[in-house]
Amino acid sequence: MSAAAPAGAQPPRASANVCQAASCLAMGSAQVCRALEAEVAAAGLDDVAVRRVGCLGLCAAGPLVEVPEQGRIFERVLPGDPSSREGLLASLKGEARGGRPVASDPFFSRQVKVVLERCGTVDPENIDDYLATGGYEALAKVAGSMSPDEVTSEVVKSGLRGRGGAGYPTGLKWRTVAKEAGAAGKFVVCNADEGDPGAFMDRSVMESSPHQVLEGMAIAGYAVGANRGYVYVRAEYPLAAERLALAIRQAERRGYLGARVAGTRFSFHVELRMGAGAYVCGEETALIASIQGERGTPRPRPPYPAASGLWGCPTLINNVETFANVPSIIVRGGEWFASIGTERSKGTKVFSLAGAVKNTGVVEVPMGLTLREIVFDIGGGLAPGRRFKAVQTGGPAGGCLPEELLDMPVDYESLTQAGSMMGSGGMIVMDDTTCMVDVAKFFMDFCRQESCGKCVPCRVGTHEMWRLLDRMTRGVASRWDLEQLESLAGMVRAMSLCGLGQGAPSPVFSTLRYFRDEYVAHIDEHVCPAGSCHMGTAEPAAAGVSPA
Amino acid sequence: MSKPKLATIWLDGCSGCHMSFLDMDELILEVAERADLVYGPLVDAKEFPEGVDVTLVEGAVGSSEDLRKVREVRERTRVLVAFGDCAVTGNVPSLRNPIGPRAVLETVYLEKPTHNAQIPSQLVPELLEEDLPVHAWVPVDVYLTGCPPSAARIYECVKRLLDGEAPETVSEAVAWKFG
Amino acid sequence: MSEVRTLQIDGKDVAARSDETILCAAEENEIHIPTLCHLEGLSDVGACRLCVVEVEGTPKLMAACTTTVEEGMKVTTTSERLVAYRRRAIEMLFVERNHICAVCVANNNCELQAHARNVGLDHFELPLMHPALPVDASHERFVMDHNRCILCTRCVRVCDEVEQAHTWDVAGRGTGARIVSDLGMPWGSSTTCTSCGKCVQVCPTGALFEKGRSISEPKARRPYLPYLVRVKERER
C-alpha cells in the first residue's frame, strides 16, 4: 500500500504521508487514510499519493499527515471531521497554507534524525520502502566485504553507548561477546521491553522502521559471531510486534535474514518473543530467563550475559534504539557518528517528551543539547500561565531535575551527576501543579508493583518506602518518617539484587535533593505546596492504624 | 531518699509475663527491697500513679481501653519497658490482624455460642482495627523480648534500671530472642 | 580446570579454588558470613542478601554466595554499614508476614529467629504488614503455612534439583509473591509431589512442617543434603 503510483509511472507531484503509528491510529488515522484516498480521488488529484508512514513525532496532536513537498505537517486530521482536512487538501493541490512548517518550526528544525531518519517517511509494512532509502545496504556491505572485527571497530570508533539506560559502550560489549568461544552458538537479543512510565520511543521506532532494528541486529550478529537473534517485545505493544513479525518475514523472503544473508555464507535467524507484562523483564538477566520460558526474575551478575546468557551461551543484549543506530554507523562511518554529540556521549538520543509540555511526542536530538532547548524550544514550553517545575528523566530509576539545571547538557555523565540518569529516554515535564512528593510516591508505587519479589530489600523496601511517601502525601507523616525514608532508600539501593531495586530509591533521592522543602511542608505544616495532595487528619505514630 | 517507684500493667496478653515475673523466687524480695511496687495486677491500686520510675507493660494494644491506659502510663512513667513479645511485636493477640476485629467478634460471639449469641457492646471497650505492639502508639525505652521473658532476664532488666543504667544499654544487655 | 587464587577476607590472606565463591572461601577459613537462602547442596540464588560483602574497588555490595573469588580480591564481611543493612533485611522478613515465634513449630529451631537474635533485633521499626495468608494443609503428611514463608526458595530448589519433581515454584510478584505447588493447585492434589519431605527438611522457618508436630519441636535435618547430592551425582 505504498506509493500509489503504479510502476513506471511518473512519481507523484505531491503526497499525503499519514502516520500509522499507535497513537495516531488510536485517533483514527486508518480511517483518515481511507477518507483522504476518497477525497483525493473525488478531487481528481491523480498525481497525489496517499501513503501510510510511521511516526511523525507530534504524537499528542494526531492524527498527523505530512505533505513533504510543501514541508508541512497537519495536526488533528480527524476522520469524522472533513473540515479538519481542508488545509491539507489545499496543500495537496499546491497551495501553501495551514499546518506546521517543518523547516522553521523548532519542534522539527531543532531535531537531528539518525535513528528516526525513516520514521514518517517509509511505510513500515513495506520492505521496498526501506530498501529504496538505502535499507539493508549496511548489512550487505558488512556481510559481503567486512570482517567481523572491522565491524566492531567501526562501532567502537563511533562511541555509541547503550541506549537502554546504563550507557555501556556498545562496541566494547560487542567485542566482549565476539571474543567468547561460544562453542554451542551465540545469541543476539534486542531488548524491546520498554516499560518506563512515559517512555514510548522504542515503540515508535519499531512501529515506524522495524527493518532498521532487524538490520542492526543482523550486523551485530555478524560482528559477534551469532546466528540467532531474539526480539523481546512487550505484549502491550501489539502493533510493534505485528510489524516486526511482518518485517522478519519480508526480510527472510528477500534474503536479508535467515540462511545466506545478502547472498553470503552468513546466516542469521530472528524470532520474536513476547513479554507478559513484567517490567523487571527489561533487566537483562530476567529477560533471558523469560525467553528461556522461565519465571522472569533477575539473577546476580557476574556472569554477565556476554559470557553466559541464553541457555548458557554468550549473548549480546542491546536496546532497540542502539540497534537502530547501527546501520547508519556502518554506512556513514563511525567517525561521522562520533562527530555528533559531546566528548563522551556521541550521536543522538531519542526522547519521548511528555507531561506538561506543549509538543508531546517523540524527538531526536544530538547529545549535549540542554534540557532547556529540549523542553522549551522543541517542546514549545508549558501551557500559558503554568510555570516549569521539574523534568523527570530515566524512568523509575531516574530522577527529577529542577529549573536550576535547565541549562545542563543532556549527556550520560551530566544526568548521572545530577542524580538522575539518561535511562531509555522518557522525559516527563512537570509544572507547578505537580507535587514532587506525590511524584516520588508514584514511581515508588510503580516499583513496588513491579518488584519481582525475589530479593528482600526490593520486595519489602519499595513497599515500605511507598507507605512512608503515602503517609506524607496524606499529611500524617512525621520527621521520623522522613528519617526512615532516607535510611530505607540507602539500604534498598545498596542491597537489592538488580537494577530495579537499586534504582528504585532514585526518585526519592533526587526529589529530596532538589525539593526537600516540599517534603518538609507536607510533614511540618501538613500542607502540599503544589496543592495536589489531599491532606487528611492526624494519625498515630504507627502506620496502618485507624485512630481509636 | 525514697525508693524508686516500679509499676507493672497488663494489656492484651495472657499474663504469662507476670507469671514469669513472679517466678523470680527469692529475688523478688530484693526487688521489693529496692523499689516500691506502686501499681499492677498484683497491687490494690485503682489509679495509675504519677511519677513512676519504671513500668513493665505486658501485652499488646488491642482495645480502646488498652490505648487509654498505655498513653496514661507513658505520661506518668520515666522508663517504659515493653514487657514480653506481645508488647514488643503483637505476638499471639496480633494473629487477629489479618482478618480484622469484626470477623473475630462474629466467630466468638455469634457463630460459636449455643445460646444467647450476641456481640457484647456495653461496658466493654471497643477493639481497635489492629492489635499492635506498644511502640506503635507510644515511645518505648526498653524492649524485653520472650514469650515469656525468663525470670532471670526480667530480674536483670529491672535491677539494671533500678540501678539507674541508661535504657539503651539495658535494652542491649537484655536482648534475647522472640518466642 | 580450577586454579588457586589468593585473596584477602577481613584482612586475612586466604587461598581458594578459582571456581569457589567468596562464601565458600570464607567458611573454609572460619570466617562466618550470615546466610539464609544459601544451603549447601543447592544452587545459589543470592536472594536473601544477608551474605552481601564489600569488595574493594567495587561500589556495589556483592552477594558472597554467588560471587566467585578473584586474584587479589579484598573482601570485607563485617562493617557498620553491612551489619545495619543485614539487620534491616532481617527486620523486613519479619514484618512482611505473620511470624509469631511463640506459637511456631520451628520456635528455637528457626534460622530467621536465630538471625534476629544474632543481630540483636529486639523490636521492629517498620510496621507489621499483617497480610491475610492461607495455610495449605491439604497434603496428607505436610503443611505449608504461608504466614511463615520468607521466599528463600530452598524448597523450590531442592524439589527441582535434588528430588527433580519440580512441584514447587514461585508465583506472583513483589510482596504478593507466593510459593505454589503444581501451578497453584493445593499441595494435596499435586500429581508431581513424591511426598519425599525434602522441602520440609530444608525450610529455614516453620513454613513447611510435618503434620502432628507441635511448637518448638526440632524438625529439620539439613546436613544430610550434601550427602544426598553426592549420592545422586554418583548415580548419574
Image (spheres, rainbow, N blue to C red):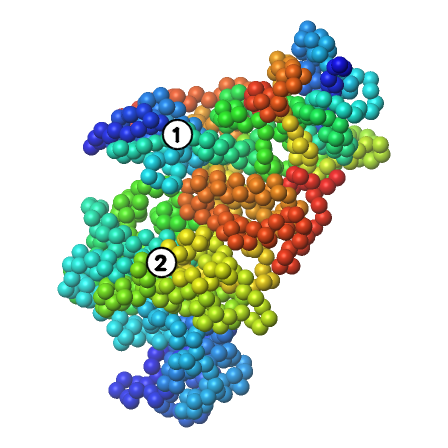
Q: Above or below — where is A538 with respect to B81? A: below
Q: Are marks 1 and 2 on the same chain?
A: no
Residue B164 visible in the current orientation: yes
Direction front: furthest residue: B1
The quadrant in which residue C53 appears is top left
x, y percent for residue B69? 76, 30
Residue occupying image coordinates x 61% and y 40%: A480
Left of C103 or right of it: where is A325?
left
Circle 1 — which element? Answer: loop
In terms of depth relative to the viewer, which is nearer, A487 or A66? Answer: A487
Label placed on residue C77: 1
The residue type indicated by label 1 comes to Thr
User: What whole-number distance in Å separates the C-alpha atoms at marks 1 and 2?
Assistant: 35 Å
Given the image, what chain letter belongs to the residue carrying mark 1?
C
x, y percent for residue A347? 31, 64
In terms of depth relative to the viewer, which is nearer, C137 or A161? Answer: A161
Residue occupying image coordinates x 73% and y 11%: B32
Observer-side mark, 1 or 2, equals 1
Instruction: Please identify the quadrant where the N terminus of chain B is shown.
Output: top right
Label placed on residue A156: none
Label placed on residue A163: 2
The residue type indicated by label 2 comes to Arg
Crowd rating for badge 1 (residues with CA inside 10 Å; few <14, some 14–19, many 20+): many
Left of C139 or right of it: where is C15?
left
